[in-house]
Amino acid sequence: MSARSGAIRAVYLVFALIGLSCAAVSQLNLLTTHQEVEIGRQAAREVEREVKIYRDPVVSAYVDSLGQVLVRHSRRPGVKYSFKVVDTDQVNAFALPGGWLYINRGLITTAENEAELAGVIGHEIGHVVGKHGARQITKQYGLAVLVELAVGGENPSLARKIAGQFAAMGAGLTLLKYGRDAEREADYFAVEETYAAGINPEGMATFFEKLMAQQESKQESKQLWARGWFSTHPASRERIANVREQIAELPPKAGLKKDSKRFQEIKSRILKKDKTRSGETKLRETFRAF
Ligand SMILES: [Zn+2]
């Protein structure tokens, strides 16, 4: 985009914004797909400096292939999606704007079957489908994002700042907290995607139920793994009920897949590696103790 056409677009959108109420603005996305993807790319670079990526080509290939099947059955298949596994026990997953998705190792091993994993991946794809990251950026930065991204030329500093905010793992995660409506919408898209892909959409409901049970049990809620998902995903019985309601309205479909041999092989592979690794750690600690 030339600076001139960018400026014209900025002016046009300023007028468009003045005419909108605050509530409407929070639903608004001022980013083009190209800008959304570019911010996501920078954010992904920042994120990958902060987190440890799980590097097992067999596991990566499986997660990517499951993800791409769901993408093909989503409402936004035109964006290039990237799926990576994060090497942590914490049960969580997150999506950056523009299609960069991260699934924690602990989430894969906590899922009981492929349908549960697919439900969660489908939910994260749903955040990209709903452009929730782009809307969040618009909401947080308002006109500043519009003006700078429209006229700021290559690699504007605000885009870097936004990317950095997405990368600020841990404490804040403000930009990854998409809000109740966005979570509900992502759930809705996840049911659509899994069902269309021939995977049982019940998986998402059973996975949420499992996490909720963990959250409600006092003892378990102290555990790291139960905290992860809820730090960015407010859970409620209402969400589970909505998912079940949506499923009940779907026309019956024969042969919806609940599990696969491949999923169980991948899960065992990760668990087996975990055991070896914790053995190694213990051994190192023993040596240190001496
Ligand atoms: Zn979410």
Image (spheres, rainbow, N blue to C red):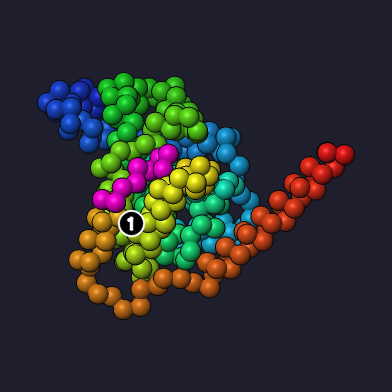
Residue 247 seen in render: yes
Q: Is residue 278 toward the left or the right of residue 283 in the image?
A: left
Q: Is residue 87 left or right of residue 25?
A: right
Taking depth in this image into account, of 33 and 70 the one nearest to the observer is 70
Question: x, y percentage for residue 54?
Answer: 61, 49
Give amino acid for label 1: Ala
Q: Which residue is at a point 58% across and 35% down the rendered structure image?
A: 49
Quadrant position of the N terminus in the picture: top left
Closest to the observer, 273 or 19: 273
Q: Residue at x 26, y 50 (%)?
A: 238
Q: Give the quadrant of residue 39.
A: top left
**Residue 63 location in percent, x, y?**
51, 58
Q: Which residues are magenta?
A: 228-238
On whether ligand 1 comes within 8 Å of the CB at mark 1, the answer is no
224 up-or-down from 57: above or below: above
> Residue 231: image x %, image y %?
42, 39
Q: Which residue is mark 1?
A: 190
- Picture residue at 39% right of the left edge, 31% below the top: 174
Residue 237 included in the magenta stretch of the image = yes
